[in-house]
Image (spheres, rainbow, N blue to C red):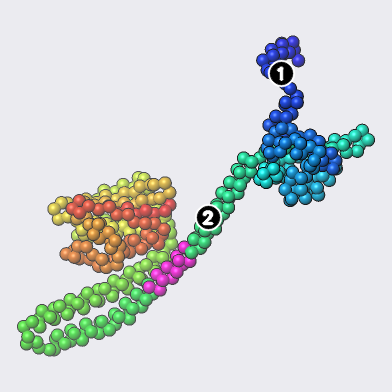
Amino acid sequence: MSDVDNAGRSEHDGQLPKENLNDFYEHAPCGYCSCLPDGVLVKVNQTLLDWLGYTRQDLVARQDFQQLLTIGGRLHYETYCVPLLLLQGQVREISYQLRRKDGSTLPVLMNAVLLRATDGQPLGSRITLFDITDRRKFEQELLRAKSEAEEQREQLARANEQLLAKNEELLRINADLDSFVYTASHDLKQPIDNIAGLFAELKNTATFHDQAAASMVGMFEEALRQILGTISDLTAVVQQQRELKLAPEEVLALQPITEEIISSLQAKGGKGTFMLDFNAVPTLRTARPILHVLLYNLLSNALKYADASRHPYIKVYTVLLDTTIVLCVQDNGRGIDLKRHGQELFQLFRRFHPEVAGSGMGLYLVNRLVHQVGGRVEVHSTVGKGTTFRVHLPQ
């Protein structure tokens, strides 16, 4: 070490209070004690006495170190720690509980060093003890948090199992309902056709003298037409869903498919201005029939429910939100009173503008197919201003 270093150290040493070795021992930030080979305490510092609530006279030459431990700690100390100390000459960081004079306990970490005579015989041991109360509290808090996390994980696992079971049950119920609807509509069609045929024959051969008969005949014919239409629609919707489930997925460009659908609608007399913007998401990976059904129903509805006071304007565009693709169809049509009809919007055969021809299946089918592929349909609408359908689809 250089003279400069020595001078600097001497200068700083002069600023420190004179160290008293006995005071350093007595009031160290840890507990010290010394004991004979049989454990009898021969020296204890003031820090340890303060921790335990004893006086020096209570412990020195009166108690063994083992007596300061709990029963379990004493057994461990005598059967494990003492043999290890004799074998290795030291032990480090062994956790014990010390018994205070008032009966409470103090968690400590113990380090011990064995002292030997020149002939190798044990003279005693010096023991250093560190208060780990705060550490033990932290460990217990960690264990509690871990236990709570495991319990929550188990609860989530059980809830997930229940949800999976419910989902499987719902899928089975839906499949059963579809099969029932398809079978029932198929079985009902033949007798209804027979009734329609018999009524047509009756109308051609019978003579009605009552003046009200003509209107009643018309009402009966309309009722038959509605029944046959409902049965046909039920059969079609179930059959269509079955076919769509089997359709393979592929990457589809939105622009040409949408333009094709618009051309088809315009060929049927649909009049409106369309604005397409697929720059955000130009393609979708899905089954072609599913995409066609979604776009066809949303676009045809936009034209069908146009406001007679203004030219129909329909905007079709995509938005990318994190891991979700949003396909949007916005119109300036009549709008829907969502406060009144929002809960019924996607129900089968529900119609909110009776004066407009329709079956009430389009939105039901759209919602069913979107849920089938793991998405959802969001609707924003203002009566007299228009409606926006936002179809959220996973990437």
Horizontally, residue 256 falls left or right of residue 45, namely left
* Mark number, residue 152: 2
Horizontally, residue 119 falls left or right of residue 58, namely right
Q: Earlier in the sequence, mark 2 or mark 1?
A: 1
Q: Which is nearer the eye, 325 or 286?
A: 325
197 inside magenta stretch: no
Instruction: Name which residue type carries label 2.
Output: Gln
Secondary structure under tag 2 reads: helix
164 inside magenta stretch: yes
Q: Count residues near mark 1 (Cα–Cα under 10 Å), then give few for <14, some for 14-19, many for 20+.
A: few
Residue 312, x across and y down, in percent: 19, 52
Q: Which is nearer the eye, 61 or 106?
A: 61
Q: Quadrant of residue 198?
A: bottom left
* Mark number, residue 18: 1
Q: Residue at x 6, y 83 (%)?
A: 211
Q: Is residue 393 above or below residue 62?
A: below
Q: Residue at x 55, y 52 (%)?
A: 149
Q: Which is nearer the eye, 50 or 136?
A: 50
Q: Of tags 2 and 1, which is closer to the observer?
A: 1
* Magenta segment: 163-177
